[in-house]
Amino acid sequence: MKGPLFYSKILLFGEYGIIKDSKGLSIPYNFFKGALKVADDLDQEAKDSNQNLRNFAKYLAEIQEQGVVKFDLQKLQEDIDAGMHFDSSIPQGYGVGSSGALVAAIYDKYAEDKITVLENLTRDKLLKLKEIFGLMESFFHGSSSGLDPLNSYLSLPILIHSKDNIEPAGIPSQSTEHKKGAVFLLDSGIVGETAPMVSIFMENMKQEGFRNMLKDQFVKYTDACVDDFLKGDVKSLFSNIKQLSHVVLDNFKPMIPKQFHTLWKNGIETNDYYLKLCGSGGGGYILGFTQDFEKAQASLKDYKLEVVYNF
């Protein structure tokens, strides 16, 4: 038995900002995917996943008592006992939503009265799903907005206006002819942990200067980037991304692995590319934007780059 596929996601804009009601834009990324699978003969990775699901099932029984969502826990337990695991190519700790895809897969298979992708997705239904997914994913992160699983479950770009206002978004279709610009992922080669990064951020939020910077600079440029991207205004987008990249380098240093500080600065100074956090940072992927991918490739020749979107 193998269940339907759930994809990874990329939060193009809004990391950290969405905690404080900035806009955000999240897109599915089909390069990585995962599915629930039942097998008798499990390798070590599948055994670990099976054990993880066992612990997750206990947690789901606890949150079910809150009355927000109901699962067929008996069926889930039977499948886990039969060797169910999450067979996934999504790297963990890379900011592309590995736990989100797992949460989406479990909800899809075991939730009762589930909200399906095929029905008319009103704002209320989207917020309800986001709330359920946030509760479920908190098992992995300590606290979750529920956006990663939502993206994975719907396989649609999602525009975040604020915590309580989200909608599926139409993004400009990718042009492949003569287009040099790209959004890309740069592999830092380091696994990032979400929880410690979020706690550094929360600690910083206690300082008035940091809060002001977030509101006056980080959220301002993030919102502008989202608007430019959706409108397809590439010129304005790159001017705002440059500013955003600068703000992140100046104020989110702990979230950028040390060996990438110079690379980050180099992009801003040469304009060959601009880097930003992908997810909570601390490792995993770093997101890059460039108006000339060949130029960016030459500047970043020592690193593995994956194109996510073409301008």
Image (tube, helix red, strand yellow):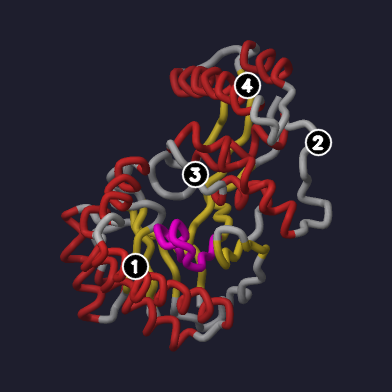
Q: 261 or 22: which is nearer to us?
A: 22
How far apart marks 1 and 4 lie (CA) works out to 38 Å
Residue 161 lies in quadrant: bottom right
Tell me if label 4 and label 2 are in contact, CB under 8 Å: no
Q: Name the residue at 43% across, 72% down.
A: 222
State the residue lying farthest toward the right: 119
Q: Name the residue at 57% across, 64% down.
A: 160
What range is drawn magenta here? Answer: 13-26
Q: Which residue is mark 3?
A: 144
Residue 136 part of the magenta-drawn span: no
Q: Is residue 140 above or below residue 233?
A: above
- 10 Å neighbourhood of mark 2: few (<14), some, or many (≥20)? few
> Residue 12 location in percent, x, y?
47, 64
How far apart marks 3 and 1 lie (CA) works out to 20 Å
Q: Which residue is mark 1?
A: 214
Q: Secondary structure at mark 2?
A: loop
Mark closer to the chain start, 1 or 2 = 2
Q: Quadrant of the N terminus?
A: top right
- 10 Å neighbourhood of mark 3: few (<14), some, or many (≥20)? many
Mark closer to the chain start, 1 or 4 = 4
Amino acid carrying mark 3 in the image: Ser
How far apart marks 1 and 2 lie (CA) works out to 40 Å
Tell me if label 1 and label 2 are in contact, CB under 8 Å: no
Amino acid carrying mark 4 in the image: Ala
Mark closer to the chain start, 2 or 3 = 2
Amino acid carrying mark 1 in the image: Leu
Mark closer to the chain start, 4 or 2 = 4
Q: Which residue is mark 4?
A: 61
Residue 20 part of the magenta-drawn span: yes
Amino acid carrying mark 2 in the image: Asp
- 10 Å neighbourhood of mark 4: few (<14), some, or many (≥20)? some
Q: Which residue is mark 2?
A: 113
